Image (cartoon, rainbow, N blue to C red):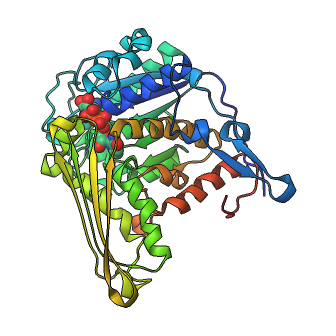
Amino acid sequence: MAKEIVKPATGKLGIMVVGLGAVSTTFMTGVMMARKGLAKPVGSMTQYDKIRVGKGENKKYLHYNEIVSMPSLDDLVFAAWDVYPVNAYESAINAEVLKEKDIEPVKDELLKIKPLKAAFDKNYAKRLDGDNVKQCKDRWDMTEQVREDIRNFKKETGVDRVVVLWAASTEIYVEPDMKYHGTIAALEQAMKDNVVDKVAPSMCYAYAALMEGCPFIMGAPNTTVDIPAMWELSEKTQLPIAGKDFKTGQTLVKSGFAPIIGTRMLGLNGWFSTNILGNRDGLVLDEPANFRTKEVSKLSTLESILVADNQPDLYSNYYHKVRINYYPPRNDNKEGWDNIDIFGWMGYPMQIKINFLCRDSILAAPLCLDLCLLMDLAHRAGRYGTQRFLSFFLKSPMHDYTKDEIPVNHLFQQYVMLKNAIREMGGYEADEEID
Ligand SMILES: NC(=O)c1ccc[n+]([C@@H]2O[C@H](COP(=O)([O-])OP(=O)(O)OC[C@H]3O[C@@H](n4cnc5c(N)ncnc54)[C@H](O)[C@@H]3O)[C@@H](O)[C@H]2O)c1
């Protein structure tokens, strides 16, 4: 097999984050603290995981940066957009995810990250009322202004490459509609015609990123890059796109636990997942139209792991329900409950209960780092279009639904896809061995 040519990770990597809330400030603060040796980037695959390359006597276990050229944490330069004008330091304090002692040592760096004006439309997140918002004539103008922000950031910082990451609030659900989302031309026309209910602000960011040569990652469940127009644009610009929705707490557990049921041929009657969450993300998701976007994303996980068509006796009739309840006292410390009704030999019922007391942004921050570094890697390797190997990090992996493509949700299959992509980009052979 021909070795993929991966351009070396020279110079600085700019990371422009849409949204300067709990997740993004936890991500940035952690990177800055780790650079000073004051914290460890626990949970990050690119910083910790080792992949086997070679077989038999020749096998070695190597970190990602020993297999392929990767930027170091020192090479990262941050910028952000937000609806609220507060800088990254104040936002990190307000988010109450991290203790002050874990923020103060990098206060000066965080103070410098002042949010650019957001490309925002209140109809997409009614619960937000910040005023750090661009004045736009129409969606086309909105896109042009975001493009200018990216160009200015490159000029001012001298970064070599830029990745754009959406870690902003979940927008209301936008059903893919071929009339507006089917082709680049249709999307551009919709932007010019200002079809505001079909062109979400997130689409303006994604379009702008791709037009400015930047890979784009959708960390929320928005359908932004899940439309043929964006697939076409990413091919035309030869840039990678990835999405959607960080796979952090409950869905991580689900995609890791469902295979236990599926591989032991146990049956499923129902899976009820509920959460309490009290941060701003929870507030936005308390709005039914915004929750709908999350619900669609969260519900997709089980169907491709426990498949009715493959095992009609076991999986034809299960009831899958997901709820998120806004409950301020818990802030970012989400608590999730899963009740799983399974059945075994001769149909006898059993129950499994999982209670995960997690910290939402603590789980999401390493995913932000990995997704940014791996999208930059994919770009340097000349990969473009939907990056399926990143499904490991995503709750509702992108797939081509126009061709009935099935997303891979099984955590361990996703891990094999991730490892094989790194192996291939490093010039090693892909394989399916488990270790
Ligand atoms: N933390 C997790 O475990 C997790 C998992 C999956 C997905 N997510 C998603 O990540 C996103 C961020 O979560 P969070 O907890 O940081 O939320 P947050 O509310 O703390 O931060 C989001 C920020 O985005 C800003 N924003 C909204 N629309 C914007 C726009 N158009 N342009 C610029 N800024 C905009 C808001 O003002 C807010 O400050 C949410 O969509 C959430 O659903 C989080």
Query: In terms of image quadrants, where is residue 206?
Result: top left
The answer to whether residue 53 shows anywhere in this view is yes
Please give left or right for residue 433 compared with residue 138 in the image.
right
Tell which of 106 and 116 is nearer to you.
106
The answer to whether residue 176 shows anywhere in this view is no
Tell which of 423 and 328 is nearer to you.
328
Query: Which residue is drawn at the image coordinates 39% and 36% (left, top)?
Result: 362
Query: Which residue is drawn at the image coordinates 72% and 43% (left, top)?
Result: 62
Tell which of 328 and 129 is nearer to you.
328
Q: Quadrant of the N terminus?
A: bottom right
Ligand 1 picture quarter? top left
* Residue 246 placement (x, y as % from top left): 39, 46
Query: Which residue is drawn at the image coordinates 29% and 60% (left, top)?
Result: 338
Please give left or right for residue 176 compared with residue 257 in the image.
left
In the image, farthest residue toward the right: 57
In the image, farthest residue toward the top: 108
* Residue 406 placement (x, y as % from top left): 45, 68
* Residue 96 placement (x, y as % from top left): 28, 26
